[in-house]
Image (cartoon, rainbow, N blue to C red):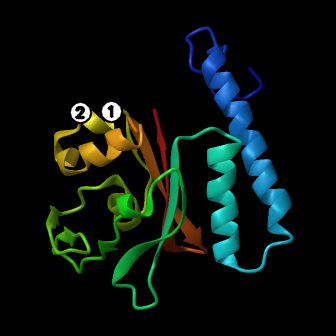
Amino acid sequence: NNGESSDTPDGSAAPESRHRSVALYEALGAVAGAAAGLEGVDALYAATCDALRNLAGFDAVSIRRADDDGQWLVPVAWHGWGQGALTRYELPGPGDAVSMADDALVGPLVHPTARSFLERRSIYTADYQAEPSLRQYWERARAHGVHALVATPLWRGDEVVGTLTVGSA
């Protein structure tokens, strides 16, 4: 299958998966094409969210980055989420818990977005609304039609500077 990943045992991609893969490829191509004309990283982040939502058809996309003091992971671009649904996460010191901006305890490394940033790896949740550790986010996820979620770190050199989170029905 020419080195492409597939979703079925016989090596062929399921039609929905193949369509989503093509849409994702086209969306990333659009972002790359637009990047040359963009001024600043925030414009690139916004273009990325727009392309993943509008061209690839993902239900919700957000990008967060560490603030200048490195104390908070804050939303800087999004599409498909209402701004009120976006949480900023306090970045803990060693052994500290992650907390929401309103100081309600979230618990250590609970949300996939915070975990992705802190653990420096992609986090995938296949059934977001059935994951007991994410119960406090279920209502928000239902409101935006999110069932599956992936969060991946954004790197600058060897440093994680933010996260890209994509939600899908």
Instruction: Determine the residue positioned at 40% across, 65% down.
Output: 117
**Amino acid type, callout 1:** Asp
Q: Is residue 59 above or below residue 16?
A: below
Q: Position of residue 9 (x, y in %)?
A: 55, 11
Q: Position of residue 67 (x, y in %)?
A: 44, 84
Q: Position of residue 28 (x, y in %)?
A: 73, 49
Q: Position of residue 12 (x, y in %)?
A: 67, 13
Q: In whole angstroms, how far apart are the C-alphas of marks 1 and 2? A: 6 Å
Instruction: Determine the residue positioned at 25% across, 43% down.
Output: 138
138 and 41: which one is in front? 138
Instruction: Determine the residue positioned at 36% across, 58% down.
Output: 85
User: Residue 150, labelled with which disc?
Assistant: none
Most extreme residue toward the top is: 10
The residue under label 2 is 130
| Left or right relative to 19: residue 77 | left
The residue under label 1 is 127
- Which quarter of the image is occupied by the C terminus? top left
- Which quarter of the image is occupied by the N terminus? top right
